[in-house]
Image (tube, rainbow, N blue to C red):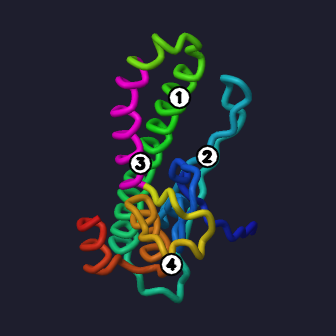
Amino acid sequence: LNRFVWNLEYPAATEAPGVTWGASTDGPRVVPGKYNIRLKLGDSVIMTRTFEIRKDPRLSTTDADFKAQFDLLMKINKKVTETHEAINSLRDIRTQINGLLGKITDTTKAKPIKDIAKPITDTLTAVEEELVQTKAKSGQDLLNFPMKLNNKLAALTPTVASADTRPTKQAYQAYDDI
């Protein structure tokens, strides 16, 4: 009888450069149950197997508890991904705008274009600063600068995943508040 101890996880949330504290972008672990795996070579399925993820027999956690934890972790993971994708997108847009402005050599043409671009880049920066702490350069900096949305969301992941149990009412409330 072959036995393996695996923690199979769903994909991690999208990353965004920056400093976080007490946070994780790890995907949630799969819940106990039966799963199918297919080994493919190109477009051809070479092998198909069924396997079972079993809960630790010492736990009293129910299937519904595991499912509730999984569901909340997936919601958190999705929101962290959305937040990080937004951060990455607005940074990319700002970089493109600044890159284009840097290519304009005619100063008479540059001024009106820069005048138009400034409110756009200022707005992008303001939104970014609500989504992520841009002043933090190391983990300790977050003692001086408050956590922003991405860190607050991602900090829920290790809290909810810390035990094989149904999430607490407080975990749901924290998610809803954030």
Element at label 2: strand
Quote the CA–CA distance across marks 3 and 4.
20 Å
Q: Are marks 4 and 2 in contact (CB under 8 Å)?
A: no
**In this rendering, would 131 be left or right of 142?**
left
Nearer-N-terminus badge (1/4): 1
Residue occupied by mark 2: 37
Quadrant in the rendering for residue 113? top left
Q: Inspect the image, locate mark 3, and give the three-letter code of the amino acid beneath it.
A: Glu
User: Mark 4, mark 2: which one is toward the viewer?
Assistant: 4
Q: Inspect the image, locate mark 1, and give the three-letter code of the amino acid beneath it.
A: Asn
For residue 98, the mark is 1
Q: Are marks 3 and 4 in contact (CB under 8 Å)?
A: no
Quote the CA–CA distance across marks 2 and 1.
47 Å
Residue occupied by mark 4: 143
User: Mark 2, mark 1: which one is toward the viewer?
Assistant: 1
For residue 128, the mark is 3
104, above or below 27, in the image: above
Q: Inspect the image, locate mark 2, and give the three-letter code of the amino acid beneath it.
A: Ile
39, above or below 64, in the image: above
Q: For the residue carrying disc 4, how many other residues have a C-alpha within 10 Å: few (<14), some (14-19), or many (20+)?
A: few
Nearer-N-terminus badge (2/1): 2
